[in-house]
Amino acid sequence: MQFRTPHDLRASNPDVVTDANDLMIMQIDTNTNGSPSYVGYAPPGTTFDQGFWRIKKFVYDQNGLIIGTRWAGGDAKMNYVWNDRNSYTYG
């Protein structure tokens, strides 16, 4: 795994947002209403097809309000692939 600076990562992929201290990158996937469906965190330089992501799924009530979150695989380990987020079991 090759690590790049947060500046390089943002320049090569403007959809990737880094957090304030640049220790992790964050990726957000939204649903058809524009609300977040998934959020993922990974070390800077991680690509979407590498298994270094921690992925969280949002849970909504019948009114479209967030009522909770669930982690991929039921844990917060950083060993998931962002591109595979739809295929995981969340708990």
Image (cartoon, rainbow, N blue to C red):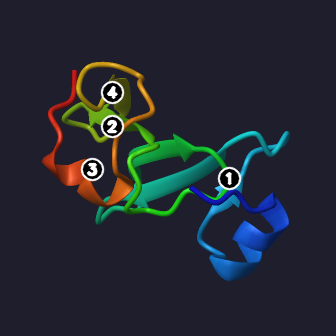
Q: CA gap, disc 1 to disc 3?
A: 19 Å
| Nearest to viewer (mark 2 / mark 1) | 1
Task: Look at the image and tell me in which quarter the N terminus lies.
Answer: bottom right
Q: Earlier in the sequence, mark 2 or mark 1?
A: 1
Mark 4 in CB contact with mark 1 (< 8 angstroms) = no
Measuring from the top left, give residue 76's x and y in whole percent. 41, 22
Q: Earlier in the sequence, mark 1 or mark 3?
A: 1
**Which secondary structure, mark 4?**
strand
- Decide which of 30, 73 is in the foreground and name it: 73
Q: Earlier in the sequence, mark 4 or mark 1?
A: 1
Mark 3 in CB contact with mark 2 (< 8 angstroms) = yes
**Residue 27 vs residue 71: left or right?**
right
Residue at left 22%, top 21%? 91
**Residue 74 vs residue 81: left or right?**
left
Question: Which residue has dot 1 on it?
Answer: 44
Q: Earlier in the sequence, mark 3 or mark 2?
A: 2
Q: Residue furthest front?
A: 1
Mark 2 in CB contact with mark 4 (< 8 angstroms) = yes
Which label belongs to residue 57? 2
Tag 3: amino acid:
Arg
Vertical placement of residue 6 versus 67, above or below? below
Residue 61 location, quadrant: top left
Question: Which residue has dot 4 on it?
Answer: 71
Q: CA gap, disc 3 to disc 2?
A: 9 Å
| Nearest to viewer (mark 4 / mark 1) | 1
